[in-house]
Amino acid sequence: MRINEFLVTNTDDYEDDFGHKHGWIELFNTSYGAVGIGGCYLTNDPANLKKYVIPKGDATTKIGPRQYTIFWADNMPTRGTYHLNFTLEESSEIILVASDGRTIIDRIKIPHEQIDTNVTYGRITDGEGSIDGSGEGWGIMERTTPKTSNITAEREPAHVVVKRMDPFGIIMAVTAMSVVFCALVLLYLSFKYMGKNAIRKAKKKLESDSPNSPATGNVSDQEESAEQLAAIAMALDLYFRELEVHDFEYTVLTRNETPKTYSPWSSKIYTLRETPVKISKR
Amino acid sequence: MESKGIFSLLGDNLSQFWQYTGVANVSFGHILMIVIGLVFIYLAIKKEWEPMLLVPIGFGIIVGNIPFFHGLSIGIYEQGSVLNILYQGVLQGWYPPLIFLGIGAMTDFSALISNPKLLLIGAAAQLGIFGAYAIALLLGFSAAEAGAIGIIGGADGPTAIFLSSRLAPDLVGAIAVSAYSYMALVPVIQPPVMKLLTSNKERLIRMKPPRAVSQNEKRIFPIVGFLLTAFIVPSGLPLLGMLFFGNLLKESGVTRRLAETARGPLIDVITILIGLTVGASTQADKFLQVRSIYIFVLGALSFVIATFGGVLFVKFLNLFLKDGNKINPLIGNAGVSAVPDSARVSHQVGMEYDKTNYLLMHAMGPNVAGVIGSAVAAGVLLGFLT
């Protein structure tokens, strides 16, 4: 979680559920998983890190991945979970503290002299920048952006940028083909060495097996060439085909009727003599 | 008065009923698309060109092009209709990974493990994707659309659907139909390119028989394969994860029932749903556009470029290999992942020149490498363009 943006003096900006305008602090979940902030603390006093405890029982304090939430700095904690017991006008710093009450997750000093009324101070890029209060990566926002990204400029979709930068697709082709090759070269190298290792192991096994048990017929995988395997497969295939032809099942002989009306068995090509050739007279 | 009122009511109802009929709403586009659907079914039944896909797609085209009165929640593009709900599997991209699970559970990677350099052919053949991408850019497609069109060259239906649903949902129908059509046409498209690029001597190269692969190697392959590829291209995670997971189910030896379900009933159910809904998504008003013609032309080109890439790469590789270890360039075409059709093409073309040179088992290596390569390429495109 990060403190992402805050508004000190609010006279004409975002309103709370009661229709009142107050300063606010935006928190941003920088992770790609939901984060529960119940039990954490928000404070404006480094000497009192447990000034405001975010209630644990509130289901809304579980912040979704890359989502934002807002706390009202109105000094009215009785109005709900999101209303703090201090205001920003009277504060010099905002500190987010972990649920242990000691670990500081994020802090930022409030540069009152720079911030006008209804103007927010925030991280230039959401979630990025200092967490030690120095203000690195922070700045005055062009617009207030409560509960949304601080980047207000319209972003070009990635594919538009890609087309603008690489109108002929050459850079994309070269880069993408390189990535594909890298992935498959890595696979190639892994399995090349794994294969060598497997062959070496098989040879060792063969050497250790053969002098001790020559008559057992212990044959390793490496001994069987593809031709041998093909011959075994062919023999098995023929064997099973033979079973099929005879249709021998449970010692009962049956006859399989073929749906083809014209089979090699009834083919005249195979059963008749060649048609005599008529020799024409000149 | 009473009888006139009844007739008037009857007339109104009949007129309304007429408006609801397909006959009242039919257009030339609908008829044309229905004819295309019938051609698909004919090709599947008579020629046996990818019947498992062309029958559902062909019938889906007919279903999607029955004219109807809009607003009754019937059409595939009408929210809440049955077809629309089934189509979500395509749009949200969860059918393709499930198909990849089944493909993984039915694929034997032995050929690849025994001769891992064949993996590189699977990478080279992905050139078709980026060749078509570049041409699509020149034709004025956006980069996202060009990426979705380019992936047709990966010759992998599920990958094409997955990527196009992410990059260009409007083009899913045309891209899927194009990808599956050209996969069925691999025996027509590839042989001329293969013959053009190879000499007689090269076509007669005999490759060493692949060594036997131990069960442990087969078990390690999906795990290592997944880790290496997914760490490089995490955006290909849904496809690569499912592919290698399916393969682990097959090779682990202890999950036979799961593997059988993945490669049997599960993949069958998803194939039916994906085929029917992709077919139905080719509604005439959405499909019959100049862009669809471009997509079909680019699809054919991508297959040709992919075949070029695969065959030429083998020739290049042969420059560095010793005699006896050389690879027959006729298996280069199998780098496009139309499994197993392109491997079969390698074999058939090889047999034309030497009846005793069996290339099928060798061609299966680049063929399954192509599946991995196209999934990685899809991940790269997804990472770059979204």
Image (tube, coloured by chain):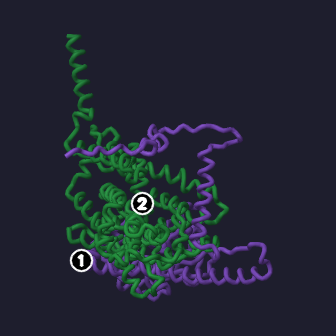
Chain colours: A purple, B green
Q: Residue B112, percent across and down?
A: 51, 73
Residue depicted at 57% across the width and 75% down the height: B211
Circle 2 Cα neighbour tier, 10 Å, few/some/many (<14 / 14–19 / ≥20): many
Disc 2 to disc 1, C-alpha distance: 27 Å
Residue depicted at 55% across the width and 70% down the height: B110
Q: Which numbered tag is attached to residue A168?
A: 1
Q: Is residue B226 visible?
A: yes
Choose top left, top right, bottom left or bottom right for residue B354. bottom left
Q: Residue B88, percent across and down?
A: 41, 52
Chain containing the residue with disc 1: A
Q: Judge whether A92 appears above or below B27 on screen.
A: below
State left or right for residue A103 relative to residue B84. Answer: right
Q: Secondary structure at mark 2?
A: helix
Residue at the far front: name it.
A282
State left or right for residue A9 relative to residue B102. Answer: left
Q: Amino acid at mark 2?
A: Pro
Tally the numbered discs: 2
Q: Which numbered tag is attached to residue B173?
A: none
Q: Is residue B78 visible?
A: no
Q: Looking at this view, is B352 or B16 the one in front?
A: B352
State if disc 1 and disc 2 touch (CB < 8 Å).
no
State left or right for residue B29 relative to residue A2. Answer: left
Q: Judge whether A248 appears above or below B16 on screen.
A: below
Chain containing the residue with disc 2: B
Choose top left, top right, bottom left or bottom right for residue A229. bottom right
Q: Residue A264, percent across and down?
A: 47, 44
Provide the residue designation for mark 2.
B158
Circle 1 Cα neighbour tier, 10 Å, few/some/many (<14 / 14–19 / ≥20): some
Q: Judge whether B147 appears above or below B54 on screen.
A: below
